[in-house]
Image (spheres, rainbow, N blue to C red):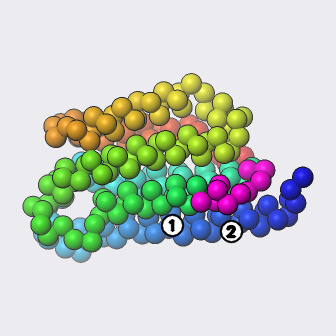
Amino acid sequence: MPDAHANADLYLHVRVIVSIILGLSIARLLNGVARFVQHPRRHRIWWTHLGWVGWMLLSVIGFWWWEFRLAEVPRWTFETYVFVALYASVYFLLCTLLFPDDIAEYSGFQDYFMSRRGWFFGLLAVSFLLDVVDTWLKGAQHFHALGLEYPIKIACSLVLCVVAMRTTDLRFHGVLVVVALLYQATFLARYYSALL
């Protein structure tokens, strides 16, 4: 049987690494929004892009909150550690795609986002797949507690990511971000309201 104290120390180490990566993710989003306030005329803002910024902020905070459940992992391995760090890193990459260092070659955030939508929605699809593994890491009981809604949510999200990667229809992207924001807010409120 693994030493509970050693496992707790490993979990603390994992939590610190995840916190650093997710803290950088939130900082990236907040710095990006602050640039709009600091220099309102420098780049043309697009509401759909800002919607995804809001969705990412909710998602990163929800992920960070729920990773506390990793304390229930009975035995930490290097592979599990790498997986969790990789999963958190995907969030950072998504945040960086939303607010790159420079968009000078684009006419604004609409032009930038639409030209990078393949990368954004591709990584977003990867994050949904990683979420399935992460959910199983927390135990079968946790996975089943999410009910039938969870696999349906994952399947629908993957399909919508593929469609979003391919379509340039701005109305589709606008509707998608509104639906995604509303669903994410209600999902977090229903399933993540308490840790224990």
Callout 2 environment at 10 Å: few (<14), some (14 to 19), or many (20+)?
Answer: few
Q: Which of 174 and 152 is in front in this view?
A: 152
Measured as percent of width and height from the top left, residue 124 is found at 39, 47
Going by the numbered disc 2, the residue's amino acid type is His
Asked if the stretch drawn in magenta spans residue 51, the answer is no
Measured as percent of width and height from the top left, residue 158 is found at 40, 35
Q: Is residue 56 left or right of residue 174?
A: right
Residue 20 occupies quadrant = bottom right
Q: Residue 21 carries which label?
A: 1
Asked if the stretch drawn in magenta spans residue 74, the answer is yes
Which residue occupies 57% across, 66% down?
Answer: 19
Measured as percent of width and height from the top left, residue 191 is found at 59, 39
Q: Which of marks 2 and 1 is nearer the N terminus?
A: 2
Residues drawn in magenta: 73-82
Q: Please tell me whether mark 1 sits on a helix, a strand or a loop.
A: helix
Q: Label 2 vs label 1: CA separation?
A: 13 Å
Going by the numbered disc 1, the residue's amino acid type is Ile
Q: Is residue 85 left or right of residue 77?
A: left
Measured as percent of width and height from the top left, residue 179 is found at 34, 36
Q: Mark 2 sits on what residue? A: 13
Callout 1 environment at 10 Å: few (<14), some (14 to 19), or many (20+)?
Answer: many
Q: What residue occupies the far top of the structure in this picture?
A: 148
Q: Please tell me whether mark 2 sits on a helix, a strand or a loop.
A: helix
Which residue occupies 68% across, 68% down?
Answer: 13
Q: Is residue 155 visible?
A: yes
Asked if marks 2 and 1 touch (Cβ < 8 Å), the reply is: no
User: Height in image: 191 above or below 3?
Assistant: above
Q: Residue 145 carries which label?
A: none
Which residue occupies 56% across, 24% down?
Answer: 148
